[in-house]
Image (cartoon, rainbow, N blue to C red):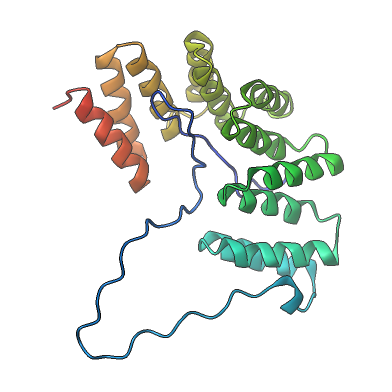
């Protein structure tokens, strides 16, 4: 089984159709640039992002590894150039196609992400990571039936994958099917009791049901496990609104 790289997870926002891809670098919020008052020269502009035409195509694995490194640094457009170069050298390199789909998803270019995950599945119909990540794309497009179908197909292949059960539960919750969502969250926790996102999903479900005590407990458990600053801020805000001390 190939190593899971660039695996995507959902986080459900309360009473919202939005979802984020967990474990991916998000763009920093923009702020006005400070006025230079020191008299020092401004910082020179950064170098232009290389285009695929400017890259000399070489060993596909080297391009793939460099793309992964750049993606880990949040340099998604540069990473995409490397993944595309890898595919130019070897159009059957599934991992490069998979990573390119992830990069498009991170940039919210969902149609292109969908296309590349489907191309992975054309080459490897039982690629459970591509099925799961395609489900995440469908979820973000609010095509929930297709998302659920994709997650279910992934679980047929990898029935012990806690993250996919969590994703499936998130899709059910978005459809308002709380009982089905709870079942999938429970399955996720049985496989991985320390998966932070599952507690966020449970907390969201409990809050929607008006079960404040359970929601507070689940959000607090999420905060114990998660080191994601953005989603910790969401959870802390929800706890404040729920009246937690």
Q: What x and y, as percent, mark residue 196?
A: 41, 34
Residue at 52% in and 42% down? 21
The image quarter in which residue 52 lies: bottom right
Q: What x and y, as percent, mark residue 217?
A: 28, 22
Total marks shown come to: 0
The image quarter in which residue 165 lies: top right
Residue closer to the observer: 144 or 74: 144
Q: From the image, which quarter does the C terminus lie in?
A: top left
Residue at 48% in and 28% down? 17
Q: From the image, which quarter does the N terminus lie in?
A: top right
Residue closer to the observer: 81 or 35: 35
136 left or right of 25 in image: right
Residue closer to the observer: 187 or 212: 212
Q: Residue furthest left?
A: 245
When the figure is inspected, residue 141 is found, relative to residue 69, above or below; the finding is above
> In this orientation, does residue 69 appear?
no
45 left or right of 237 in image: right
Residue at 68% in and 46% down? 113
When the figure is inspected, residue 130 is found, relative to residue 35, above or below; the finding is above
Q: What x and y, as percent, mark residue 185?
A: 49, 20
Q: What x and y, as percent, mark residue 153?
A: 73, 25
> In this orientation, does residue 10 appear?
yes
When the figure is inspected, residue 109 is found, relative to residue 44, above or below; the finding is above
């Amino acid at each position: 089984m190939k190593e899971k790289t660039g695996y995507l997870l959902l986080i459900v926002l309360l009473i919202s159709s939005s979802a984020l891809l967990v474990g991916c670098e998000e763009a920093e919020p923009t702020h006005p640039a400070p006025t230079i008052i020191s008299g020092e020269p401004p910082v020179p502009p950064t170098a232009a992002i290389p285009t695929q035409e400017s890259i000399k195509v070489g060993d596909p694995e080297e391009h793939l590894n460099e793309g992964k490194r750049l993606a880990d640094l949040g340099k998604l457009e540069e990473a995409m150039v490397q993944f595309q170069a890898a595919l130019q050298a070897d159009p059957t390199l599934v991992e490069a196609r998979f990573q390119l789909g992830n990069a498009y998803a991170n940039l919210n270019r969902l149609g292109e992400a969908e296309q590349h995950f489907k191309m992975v599945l054309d080459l490897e119909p039982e690629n459970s990571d591509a099925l799961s990540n395609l489900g995440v794309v469908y979820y973000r497009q609010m095509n929930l039936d297709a998302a659920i179908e994709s997650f279910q197909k992934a679980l047929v292949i990898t029935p012990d994958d806690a993250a996919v059960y969590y994703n499936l539960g998130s899709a059910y919750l978005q459809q308002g099917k709380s009982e089905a969502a709870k079942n999938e969250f429970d399955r996720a926790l049985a496989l991985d009791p320390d998966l932070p996102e599952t507690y966020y999903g449970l907390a969201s479900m409990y809050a929607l049901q008006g079960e404040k005590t359970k929601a507070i407990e689940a959000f607090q458990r999420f905060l114990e496990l998660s080191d994601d600053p953005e989603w910790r801020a969401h959870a802390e805000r929800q706890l404040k609104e729920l009246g937690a001390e």
